[in-house]
Amino acid sequence: MSQTLRGVPAVHRFLSDPRFARYESMLGRETLKRAIDAELDRARANGVPDNYEDLAARLARSLESERRQTLLEAVNATGVLLHTNLGRAPLMGSALAAAVRIGSGYSNLEFQLDGGNRGSRHARLTPLLRSVTGAEDAVVVNNCAAAVLLILDTFAKGREVIVARNQLIEIGGGFRLPDVLERSGAQLIEVGATNKVYLRDYERALSARTALLMRSHTSNYRITGFTHDVLARDLAALAKRTAVPLVEDLGSGALVNLEEYGLPHERTVQEAIRDGIDLVAFSGDKLLGGPQAGIIVGATAYIARLRANPLIRALRVDKLTIAALGETLQAYASPKRREEIPLYRMLAASTEDLRARGRAYVEALSAHVTRLADTLSFVGGGSLPETSLPSVGIVLHSVLGAEELGRRLRHGDPAILGRVDDDALLLDLRSILPEQDAAVIAGLRSAL
Ligand SMILES: *Cc1c(COP(=O)(O)O)cnc(C)c1O
C-alpha cells in the first residue's frame, strides 16, 4: 500500500470529494478508507491507473453495494403481506409511538410502582394477554422458536415428548421440530402415520418418561386425502386424565377470525385455550401484526415454571418490544381499532380501493409502460399456504426488460421489491403501504 504509482490519485482526494461524504456517515470512515484502498490497489494491480473519474465511479458502485448490506427501508410490492425476508409485519403507528415514549426515557420495566421494589418485565404484558386470549397467564420471549425451546427445556429435558408424525414441521430458517427437540435434550416419540393419527396412538405412547404431549400447527402445508387427525380437545382431555401437560406450537398466532377478511378459518389462540391446551406458543410478528416476539399463554402453574427457568434470562425481550406489543394488543379491544394494524388494513383493502390507487400510478407514469392487472396476494409468514387474496398489480413493460428493471428498483432508495410475472415486472398494490405510493411512483419514474 506504501507503493505509489505515478498517476494514481491520492486517498485524500476521494476523502474530500463531497460525493463520498454521505458514505462516511453511513458506513464509517474506516470502511470508506478501506473501499478507497481496495479501488486504488486494483488500479495499481492493473498497472494502468485509471483517471480519477473512472476510479470515483467504481468506488461509488462499491460503496453503494456496501450501503445495500446495511438495514434499509424497502417497499414490499411482492404481494406477500408477511414476508419473512422483508421483516414480516409492519408496526402500527401507536405501537411505534409507544416504543419511542418508553425507549427515550426510563420506565417501570423491572420496578414495582406499588411496593417500590424490584418487579418483573414479564408481568407487564400479562393483563392484556390474559384478556385478549382468555388464558390464565402469559410470558413473552424473543420469538416463537425461543418459546418452544424454553418450553422443551423447562419440561422435557432428558424425557419424552409425544408428537404426531403429521405434525413434525419444518418452518422457515431451518427450524425443524425434531431437531429442536433433540437440541433441547428431549426425546421425540413419534406416533401415528403421516396421514392418520388416532387418540389411541397417543395413549399407547404415554409412559412414566413422558414429559409433554405436543401439537404443532401445520401452518405451511396440508395433508389431504385419506387422513385422520385427533381433535385438540380430545387430546386435552387425555392430557388432563394423565396429568401430562399439552403444549401447542401455534406459530402464526391469529387473534381474530380471518373469515371476516374473506380468508379460510385459521385456528386462533383463543380457540386453542378453549380447547384446553395447557401452553400455547405463537409469534408476535405474524398474524398478530406486532413486533418480533414469542408469546406463551396458558395455565399459571406451568407459566410459573417457565418464568423460573434461568434460560429465560437469555431469551427475554427488550422494553421496546414490550411497549410495541402492548400497544398492538390494545388494538384488539375493538374491531374498529384493529385496522390501525397495517396487516389488517392491507387484508381489508378492497380491489376497488387498490384499483383507485393503481390508476394514480398509471396517470403519473406513461401509459405505454404501465397497466393494471388482476393478481393474487398471499398472507405469507408460513400461514395459509394455499390461500390467495384477489389483488391489483401494476404491470411494468420496459425496453430494459423485467430483470434489469427489477435490479434498478431493488437498488433504488427506497428499494422496491416486486415480482416477475409473465416476463413483466409486477408490483402488487396490496402489500405496498399507501403512504409509500408517492415514493414508489418517484422510484419508478427514475428507474424507467
Ligand atoms: C413461524 C413459526 C414458528 C417460529 O416463529 P418465530 O417467531 O419466527 O420464531 C414456530 N412454529 C410455527 C408453527 C410457526 O409457524
Image: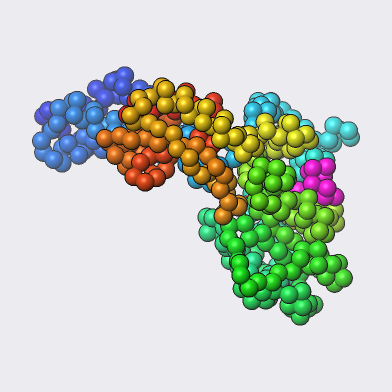
Q: Is residue 209 above or below residue 277?
A: below
Kindly tell me whether residue 215 is visible in this rendering.
Answer: yes
Answer with the quarter of the image where residue 212 lies.
Answer: bottom right
Residue 80 or residue 11, whichever sits in front: 80
Q: Position of residue 358 (x, y in %)?
A: 48, 29
Q: Position of residue 300 (x, y in %)?
A: 85, 53
Kindly tell me whether residue 182 is visible in this rendering.
Answer: no
The C terminus, quarter of image: top left
Residue at image position (82%, 45%) is: 130
Check the image and tell me how it is coloured. Answer: rainbow
Q: Tell me the magenta residue range.
A: 129-141
Answer with the quarter of the image where residue 87 lies.
Answer: top right
Answer with the quarter of the image where residue 44 lies.
Answer: top left
Residue 373 or residue 328, whichever sits in front: 373
Q: Position of residue 79 (x, y in %)?
A: 50, 42
In the picture provided, is 170 more to the left or to the right than 27?
A: right
The N terminus, quarter of image: top left
Q: Position of residue 30 (x, y in %)?
A: 37, 32
In the picture provided, is 232 more to the left or to the right than 148?
A: right
Residue 136 magenta: yes
In the picture provided, is 4 more to the left or to the right than 69?
A: left
Residue at image position (34%, 45%) is: 423
Q: Is residue 416 above or below residue 225?
A: above
Residue at image position (63%, 73%) is: 226
Q: Is residue 85 above or below residue 442?
A: below
Residue 317 magenta: no
In this view, the residue farthest toward the bottom is 204
Residue 188 or residue 171, whichever sits in front: 171
Residue at image position (28%, 20%) is: 17
Q: Is residue 266 above or below residue 203?
A: above
How many labels sit on residues?
Answer: 0
